[in-house]
Image (tube, rainbow, N blue to C red):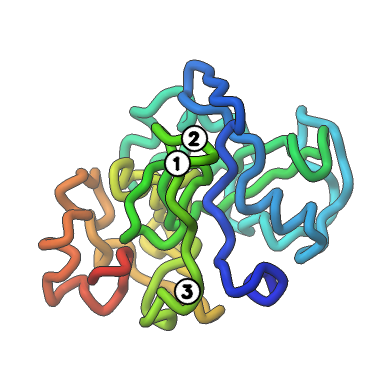
Amino acid sequence: MYVVNYRGYTVLNDYGSLTGARDSGGVIIDETWFTLFVTQKLIDYPYTTDVTAPPAGGSVLKCPSGLEDFNSGTYLDKTKPDSRTSSDGAKGYLQVSNLFDPGRAVFCWYGINGTSGSEKYIPSRRWPADGTTVTTSPGTTKMSEIRKSSETVFLFDGVSFNVQTRPNRLNARHSKYTITNLLYFDGHAESQPTKSLPGGDGVATTNDFTLANLQDARYNQIKWRLDQ
């Protein structure tokens, strides 16, 4: 529905601060992908401005195997999560809408295959990308650019984004910490043994998401980049 409403563009990773504002975690995020879905009424989500606890009731943004804690330190402490089975990777995280429904609080237990930078090979991107302005930032991705949508990861069990440089944000949280669920750009989901994914089920490194490693026959059936 987002693609239809927005002339073929996929959802943004997020809107970085349009003024370039920063905090200790980096560029302040004005909206993220899941607040876009909620504020644009593409998914149902209870209205709340309470930032101290997720709202009662079910939501597609809540993973049944996620922890009730939501104050993951992954934004401010880039060393967390420190492994694929870390509890920090199973926590939810909070975004307060700043552009489209100011003050509305939304909690989410999934990560997006996106980047805060300008890398055009990552499916979902920040706008404006870090290091750019609203006049110099490259455009974001159109669905037509994702040629292998049934193989390209959109969302994953985990937190945040930049999984290529923070690979332990991908989380093993099902079946006694052995399974990770992935949602693809064509809309279907799969449960994958975490040990079969780049970086395995232990401590992943940035080398696991290099193009050369992703193109290895062990991993290339699942796409994390548009140039795989």
Residue that extends furthest to the top in the rendered view of this protein: 24
Q: Where is residue 166 in the image (x, y as percent from the top left)?
A: 32, 41
Circle 2 — which element? loop
Q: Position of residue 38 (x, y in %)?
A: 76, 55
Cα distance between the residues tagged 1 and 2 = 5 Å
Give the amino acid type for the residue marked by disc 1 in the picture: Thr
Mark 1 sits on what residue?
136
Circle 1 — which element? loop
The reply to whether dot 1 and dot 2 touch (C-beta < 8 Å) is yes
Q: Which residue is drawn at 85% across and 47% down?
A: 56
Residue 102 falls in which quadrant of the image? Answer: top right
Image quarter (top left, top right, bottom left or bottom right) of the C terminus: bottom left
Mark 3 sits on what residue?
184
Q: Residue 133's mark?
A: 2
Cα distance between the residues tagged 1 and 3 = 30 Å
Whether residue 81 is visible here, answered yes or no, is yes
The reply to whether dot 1 and dot 3 touch (C-beta < 8 Å) is no
Alpha-carbon neighbours of circle 3 within 10 Å: few (<14), some, or many (≥20)? many
Q: Nearer the viewer, mark 1 or mark 3?
A: 1
Q: How many marks?
A: 3
Alpha-carbon neighbours of circle 1 within 10 Å: few (<14), some, or many (≥20)? few
Horizontal relation, residue 141 to residue 178: left or right: right
Q: Residue at x 48, y 30 (%)?
A: 75
Q: Which of marks 3 and 2 is in front?
A: 2
Horizontal relation, residue 119 to residue 16: left or right: left
Horizontal relation, residue 119 to residue 144: left or right: left
